[in-house]
Structures are given as C-alpha cells and as structure tokens.
Amino acid sequence: MVSPRSNEVDVQLSLQDRMVSLLGEHIEVTPRIGYLADRNLIAVRVGEIVRVVCANPADLQSCGTRGCLAIPLGT
C-alpha cells in the first residue's frame, strides 16, 4: 500500500518451501498454496493451482509409464 506521505512502495519477495511464522518473521501478506493450517489467520481465495505432470514421449517409450500417475488433491 502506498503511504500518503510517500510515493514509494517497499516490496520484498521471499520464496520458501516451508511453513513460515507470519508474526515471527514480520510478514504482513502472503500467498499460500494448500490448506490453511492456522484457523486464526484470515484467508481469501484468489485463484486455483492446477498441477500437470509432463514427460518427453521418447522417455515414456523407453522407460514405460509404470501404470497411471496420480497426485492426490490437497498435497
């Protein structure tokens, strides 16, 4: 948000592969993918993530598919 006293916005991007403590790490806003573990937080759905598994056809031909690939929802 832009302060009425300033025309500057300070944005920092941090990509983590772990759960972070919003208060402990002084984070004001964050997008999260998956279920909200802490019911004390307020969440607003802004979109959906679609997972796609892709493979080179030549690799599938030489290695096989070993059955059906499936990723359970919510993982």
Image: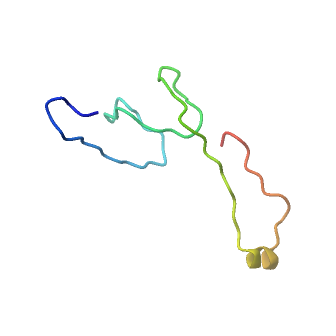
**Dividing the image into 4 quarters, which one contains the N terminus?**
top left
Toward which corner of the image does residue 22 lie, by quadrant?
Answer: top left
Q: Residue at x 53, y 21 (%)?
A: 39
Residue 2 in the figure: left or right of residue 52: left
Q: Observer-nearest residue: 22 or 43?
A: 43
Q: Residue at x 61, y 45 (%)?
A: 49
- The number of numbered discs placed on residues in the rendered structure image is 0
Q: Residue at x 81, y 77 (%)?
A: 61
Toward which corner of the image does residue 73 lie, by quadrant?
Answer: top right
Q: Residue furthest left?
A: 5
Q: Residue furthest top?
A: 40
Residue 41 in the figure: left or right of residue 14: right
On the image, the x and y values in percent for residue 15 come to 42, 49
Depicted 32 relative to depicted 69: above or below: above
Residue 61 in the figure: left or right of residue 6: right
Residue 7 in the figure: left or right of residue 1: left
On the image, the x and y values in percent for residue 35 come to 59, 33
Q: Residue at x 18, y 39 (%)?
A: 7
Q: Observer-nearest residue: 57 or 35?
A: 57
**Dividing the image into 4 quarters, which one contains the C terminus?**
top right
Depicted 59 relative to depicted 43: above or below: below
On the image, the x and y values in percent for residue 46 come to 53, 35
* Colouring mode (rainbow / by chain / secondary structure / one colour): rainbow
